[in-house]
Image (tube, rainbow, N blue to C red):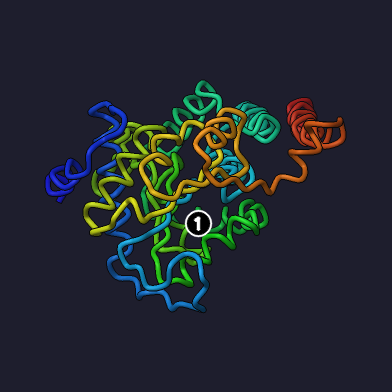
Amino acid sequence: MLTDMAALGWLTPRKRSATARSVLAGEASAEAARKSTQDLPAPEAAGKPDFPVHGDDRAAAFFDLDNTVMQGAALFHFGRGLYKRKFFETRDLARFAWQQAWFRLAGTEDPEHMQDARDSALSIVKGHRVSELKSIGEEIYDEYMAERIWPGTRALAQAHLDAGQKVWLVTAAPVEIAQVIARRLGLTGALGTVAESIGGVYTGKLVGEPLHGPAKAEAVRALAAAEGLDLTRCAAYSDSHNDIPMLSLVGHPYAINPDSKLRRHARELDWRLRDYRTGRKAAKVGIPAAAGVGAVAGGTAAAIALHRRRR
């Protein structure tokens, strides 16, 4: 199957070069996404909005997850849930809290933070069963993620669903967690980072690399080829300049809650922009929103310090 996907992935010319590991990560993610939806019933269209075009079965929509569909980073919320279930030590929670606070305040991704979070997640899940993490992912979604979905972005996704189009999440988060989120939101499926497993047990390694930057574009390209989609009729949504390769791949790119680099790029190319971050905007002009995020991180750190003293 993976060989067939690799062959199909080269049918669409690339606007930007990608490493072999990016291609492998993208194709593995596309394969995992398609497998997860093969036995699902087709969603019923709830209406016929003027946009997107109703009944265009060669069009689809691709949504980044972190800060686009959901406030904050899915991997960090997942880490909180794993800590609650004693998957790792207290000192690791402090790092997760700091990374999440930084991400929420800056509104963009720090490569070192993402690398650290990825490595931590891989070491934490090594030796655990895939089925176990899927079940825990359902619980973590209810605990930390459900209330952080941006209503505006959710409405955009629903417009595509109502038009009879498929809607996919595309994220660096583990594909199993991404699939939980997609299913809970009623979306078609998810493209995410694929962790290697043997006999249903995680090995602590990745297939290729994280689904980030060019790898996302490769995943979308591979899925589009396999599904018979016309990328010029597809839409993509993201907040990060790291996703410019994915956004540039489709005919209808959208910058959602964009970081400064993506906002500038989107304006230069006349891409559509949406911003749902009332708190983020307040942080730019005053202290209260920034202080609120800092208080969350500070409160977490204080709780950790108190816990250590009691021990």
Q: Residue at x 51, y 31 (%)?
A: 241
Q: How many numbered tags mark residues here?
A: 1
Q: Give residue 256's quadrant in the image.
A: top right
Q: Which residue is labeled 1 in the image?
A: 181
Q: Residue at x 25, y 47 (%)?
A: 222
Of the pair 191 and 284, the residue shown nearer to us: 284
Q: Give residue 273's quadrant in the image.
A: top right
Q: Is residue 250 left or right of residue 173?
A: left
Q: Is residue 222 left or right of residue 40?
A: left
Residue 177 at x, y percent in the picture:
46, 50
Q: Residue at x 50, y 25 (%)?
A: 116
Location of residue 13 with respect to 145 vertically, above or below:
above
Q: Residue at x 33, y 42 (%)?
A: 194
For the C terminus, the image quarter is top right
The answer to whether residue 304 shows anywhere in this view is yes
The answer to whether residue 133 shows anywhere in this view is no
Q: Is residue 204 left or right of residue 275?
A: left
* Amino acid under disc 1: Ile
Residue 49 at x, y percent in the picture:
52, 72
Location of residue 220 with respect to 149 vertically, above or below:
above
Residue 161 at x, y percent in the picture:
46, 68
Of the pair 97 and 237, the residue shown nearer to us: 237
Secondary-structure class at tag 1: helix
Query: How many other residues sit within 10 Å of disc 1, few (<14), some (14-19) or many (≥20)?
Result: many
